Image (cartoon, grey):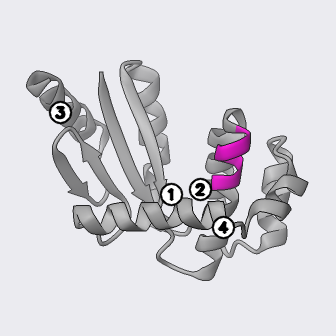
Amino acid sequence: DVTVVEFFDYLCTYCKRIIPTIQKLLKQDKNVRYVFKELPILSPDSRLAARAALVVWKYQKERYFDFHAKLMAAQGSLSEARILRFAETVGADTNLIRREIRSVEISAMLQRNFDLARRLGVRGTPAFIIGDKIVPGVIDLKDFKSLIMEAREKG
C-alpha cells in the first residue's frame, strides 16, 4: 500500500550502509513496495554496474535483488570482470549481460532514471521517495517506518 523509491549508486558508501535497514524494513512490513532506481553518479564503474543490474532486471527479475545485494556488498572498484563474477554467483546469465550491457535499451532505461532524478530535484545518493516526500541521505529504520506510516495516513 506504500511505495518507497530509492535512488542509489553502487559505489556510494551511504547506499551500502543502508542495505541491512532496507532488508529489515521489507521483512517487517510486507505492504511496502520497494523500487530501486540506479543513479550512477560517482564513476564509470558505478555506471557499468548499474547497466549490468538493469540487464538482470529486464531479463531475469528473480535474480535482481541477489545481484543488487552482491554489488552493494562489494568493496573497492567494480570492473566488468568483477561485475560478471558477481552475476555468475547469483545465477544471472553473464552472456546476456555482456551482450546487452551497452545496448540502446539499457542506455534508455538509465537515462530515464537520470531524467526522473533531475525532475524531482534529486542530486545525490541515496535519496528516497516515500509518499509525497523526497528524503536525501541515510534513513534509520525508525524514520523509515514513521515516513511510511505518514504516507499511509495520507493514503
In which quadrant of the rendered image does the C terminus lie?
A: top left
Q: Which mark is residue 146?
A: 3
Hey, which residue is sitting farthest front in the picture?
104
In the image, residue 77 lies at what x, y percent?
68, 76
In the image, residue 61 lies at what x, y percent?
67, 37
Q: In this view, does 122 lie above or below 79?
A: above
Disc 1 from disc 2: Cα separation: 5 Å
Disc 2 from disc 3: Cα separation: 25 Å
Residue at 43% across / 50% down in the picture? 18
Which amino acid type corresponds to the residue marked 4 in the rendered image? Val
Disc 3 from disc 1: Cα separation: 22 Å
Question: Can residue 41 be seen by looking at this rendering?
Answer: yes
From the image, tell me which residue sits under label 2: 72
- Position of 84 with respect to 134 (left or right) is right
How crowded pointer 1 is (Cα within 10 Å; few <14, some 14-19, many 20+) is rated as many
From the image, tell me which residue sits under label 1: 16
The picture quadrant where one finds residue 115 is bottom left
Q: Which of marks 2 and 4 is in front?
A: 4
How crowded pointer 3 is (Cα within 10 Å; few <14, some 14-19, many 20+) is rated as few
Q: Nearer the viewer, mark 3 or mark 4?
A: 4
Residue at 80% across / 57% down in the picture? 97
From the image, tell me which residue sits under label 4: 104
Question: Can residue 122 be seen by looking at this rendering?
Answer: no
Which comes before the other along the chain, label 3 or label 1?
A: 1
